[in-house]
Amino acid sequence: MQIAELKRQVDALSSNLHLCQPGSQKSCGWCCGLYDTHHASRNALVRKLRTRTKEFASTDRNLTAIQRFSEKTMRNEQSRLCDPEFYSCDFVGFLDSGETGVGCMLHPLSQGNQSIDWRGLFFHGALACQGFFCRFYRELSSAEKWVILGTIRDWYLFGLVTSDADYARTFFRLAEERLGLQIDPTNLVAAQASGLVHEFFHWKIDWPYRNHDSKPIPCNSSTFSSAEL
């Protein structure tokens, strides 16, 4: 990614653009409960999102039809939630045909909605979506966001990293302690370093020291079994 484009994104972040949809083929559905399941591998979520997206595309945009979609989705998925008190929204799906981004299918800008905001049918309502800012957004500096935006290019990993502010902040703390200087984001997104940075963040998916003989730890975890993948 070009440095100028990254700077544009970071400037936009500082003016209250949600990190949910920063563009460049990545997005986050963590606060929608996307990862709140015992089957949160990439392949498992792709299958779920693909089915939802196809079903919702053929759903009429009216109160009755949308409620039927929700009831059918919950009945068919029967997801075992890691945290039953953390709401998992049925209306998270793919936002493009290339399946490069996830997000709210009730949003007025989503396909088929003709600029109508259907988020009032969601459990928390549209105002909750508009007003929520996660820890990652609040606690990481613009420079740290810049590095993550410039090194992660897929929705699945982006969501896992942005949902774990402590993990991201630990990387920057360790890097600064080891180098003995403040992180310069332009150096970390350069070709020579970006691969190493991406490798660290990718441990959210493929932790190299996991116990392959144990059961996978559920939810936002780096230890998925080969069978689940």
Image (cartoon, helix red, strand yellow):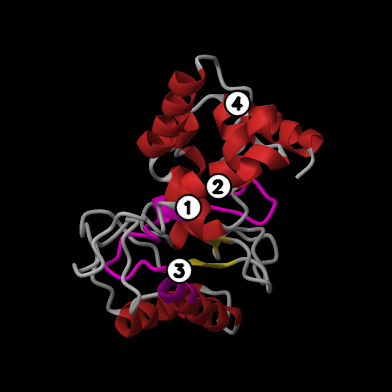
Classify mark 3: residues with Cα within 10 Å, few (<14), some (14-19) or many (20+): some
Residue at the image position 78 percent from the left and 38 percent from the top? 5
Amino acid type indicated by mark 4 = Ala
Q: Are marks 2 and 1 in contact (CB under 8 Å)?
A: yes
Q: Residue 86, position in %: x, y?
A: 27, 54
Element under disc 1: helix
Asked whether 129 falls inside the magenta stretch, the response is: no
Give the CA distance from mark 1 to mark 4.
20 Å
Residue at the spot of label 4: 143
Q: Which mark is residue 202?
A: 1
36 falls in the magenta region: yes
Q: Earlier in the sequence, mark 2 or mark 4?
A: 4
Which comes sooner in the sequence, label 3 or label 4?
A: 3
| Marks 2 and 4 close (CB-CB < 8 Å) | no
Look at the image and give the residue range highlighted in magenta: 21-46
Secondary structure character of the magenta stretch overall: loop
- Can residue 201 be seen in this snapshot? yes
Q: Which mark is residue 42?
A: 3
User: What amino acid is labelled 2 in the image?
Assistant: His
The quarter of the picture where the N terminus appears is top right
